[in-house]
Image (cartoon, grey):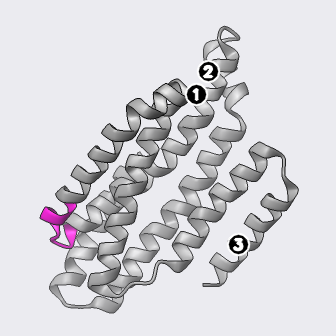
Amino acid sequence: VLAIGFSTGIVPHLTTNLEQKDFRQLKINVLSALNTVCYIGLPLSFCLFALARPIYCLMYGSTYLDIGTEALMFSALLAVTGTISPITTSMMMSLRYRRRCLEFLAVGFAVKTVTFFLLIKWFGYTGAITSSALCGLSVIVMNLSYIKRKFNISFKGFFNLFFSIFEFVGGFITGSVAISSDAVHDMGDAASI
């Protein structure tokens, strides 16, 4: 829902900025959309991850609680990439890079195809979820790299925030205070950029 709403809201602004050749405002709108989605979507995904057990128990009862909790925790990762990937795809479309965007989606599909069976073999059902997240992540990186090259937009703050959230979750999973505190430090760096 979040991705669809932002995609619908940002497309007219980027198209207008492109038509008026207002590249300064275009950069601002691209970064604002990404940062807003991150500041809303990432904490919600983290809550889904951290509260997976009680959420699953409330919705489905205690049958298969451990498996359901694990699946819901991995789905939180997919929620992150599944929110940001459509945003970057909409940006590419509105900036009139449709063909390139379709090529990137095809590469994402190839990533999904190659990793799907391997990750399922190695990790079971969580491998399927991880494969989908890798597909979304590859599309995000390719879209943003292309937008950066074309409009000279720096995504340092966005990527710093994005990866520090994953670092924080990794620290939370492993119980490592050092990793979690480094992630909080990186989030502060992202806010200053």
Alpha carbon distance from label 1 to label 3 = 28 Å
**Disc 1 residue crowd, few under 14, some 14–19, many 20+, Cα 10 Å:** some
**Nearest to N terminus: mark 1 or mark 3:** 1
Residue position marked by numbered label 3 in the rendering:
186
- The residue drawn where x is 56% and y is 29% is 123
Circle 3 sits in a helix, a strand or a loop, which is it?
A: helix
User: Height in image: 193 above or below 144?
Assistant: below
Which circle marks residue 68 in the picture? 2
Alpha carbon distance from label 2 to label 3 = 32 Å
* Residue 68 locus on image (x, y percent): 62, 21
- The residue drawn where x is 43% and y is 54% is 137
Which of the 4 quarters of the picture holds residue 52? top right
Q: Tell whether position 136 is magenta.
A: no
| Residue 184 or residue 111, whichever sits in front | 111
Magenta stretch, overall SS: helix
Residue position marked by numbered label 1 in the rendering:
71
Residue type at tag 2? Gly
* Residue 148 locus on image (x, y percent): 35, 80
Residue type at tag 1? Ala
- Residue 179 relative to residue 70: left or right: right
Which quarter shows the C terminus?
bottom right
Q: Is residue 67 visible?
A: yes
**Disc 3 residue crowd, few under 14, some 14–19, many 20+, Cα 10 Å:** many
In the rendered structure, which segment of residues is drawn in magenta? 94-101
**Nearest to N terminus: mark 2 or mark 3:** 2
Q: Are marks 1 and 2 in contact (CB under 8 Å)?
A: yes
Which of the 4 quarters of the picture holds residue 38? bottom right
